[in-house]
C-alpha cells in the first residue's frame, strides 16, 4: 500500500482485511477472500482456513441478528407512538 495516498474507504477495507488475516494461524486453505476498493483496485487478499470461514460467518451472523432485533425494537417503538397519536386524536386531541 506504499507509494500512493489512500481514501478513507480503502483504509477501512484494509482494516477489514487485517481482521481476516488475524483470525487464525491455521495454514490450511479452505477459501480465499479478495478485498477490492470502490474502483475495483485490489486492496489485498487473505487465505482462510475452514475455522476462519466459520468464525467470520458466525460473527457476521450474530451482528446481523442483533441489527435485525434492534430494528424490530425500533419498529415496535414507532408503532407504539403511532398508536398513542391515534388515541390522542380519537379523544379529540385533548390531554
Image (cartoon, helix red, strand yellow):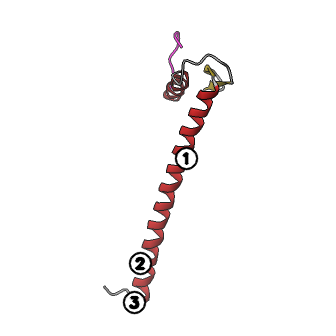
Report the magenta residues as a range.
Answer: 1-7
Taking the spot 42% from the left edge, 78% from the top edge, the residue there is 85
| Predominant SS along the magenta part | loop
Q: Does the magenta stretch include residue 77?
A: no
Give the side of residue 90 with respect to residue 43, left or right.
Answer: left
Q: Where residue 78 sits in the image (x, y, percent)?
A: 46, 67
| Camera-side mark, 1 or 3 | 1
Q: In which quarter of the image is the N terminus?
A: top right
Between 64 and 1, which is closer to the camera in this rendering?
64
Badge 3 crowding class, 10 Å Cα cut-off, few under 14, some 14 to 19, many 20 or more, is few
1 and 2 marks in contact (CB < 8 Å): no
Q: In which quarter of the image is the C terminus?
A: bottom left
Total residue callouts: 3
Q: From the image, tell me which residue sits under label 2.
A: 84
Q: Distance between the residues labelled 1 and 2?
A: 30 Å
Q: From the image, tell me which residue sits under label 3.
A: 91
Above-or-below relation of 86 to 32: below
Q: Which mark is residue 64?
A: 1
Q: Where residue 4 sits in the image (x, y, percent)?
A: 52, 13
Secondary structure type for disc 2: helix
Secondary structure type for disc 3: loop
Badge 1 crowding class, 10 Å Cα cut-off, few under 14, some 14 to 19, many 20 or more, is few
Between 28 and 35, which is closer to the camera in this rendering?
28
Amino acid at each position: 500500500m506504499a507509494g500512493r495516498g489512500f481514501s478513507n474507504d480503502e483504509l477501512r477495507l484494509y482494516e477489514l482485511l487485517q481482521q481476516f488475516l488475524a483470525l487464525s494461524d491455521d495454514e490450511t486453505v479452505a477459501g480465499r477472500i479478495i478485498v477490492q476498493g470502490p474502483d475495483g483496485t485490489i486492496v489485498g487478499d487473505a487465505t482462510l482456513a475452514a475455522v476462519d470461514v466459520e468464525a467470520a460467518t458466525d460473527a457476521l451472523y450474530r451482528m446481523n441478528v442483533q441489527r435485525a432485533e434492534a430494528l424490530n425494537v425500533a419498529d415496535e417503538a414507532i408503532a407504539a407512538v403511532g398508536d398513542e397519536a391515534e388515541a390522542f386524536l380519537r379523544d379529540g386531541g385533548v390531554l
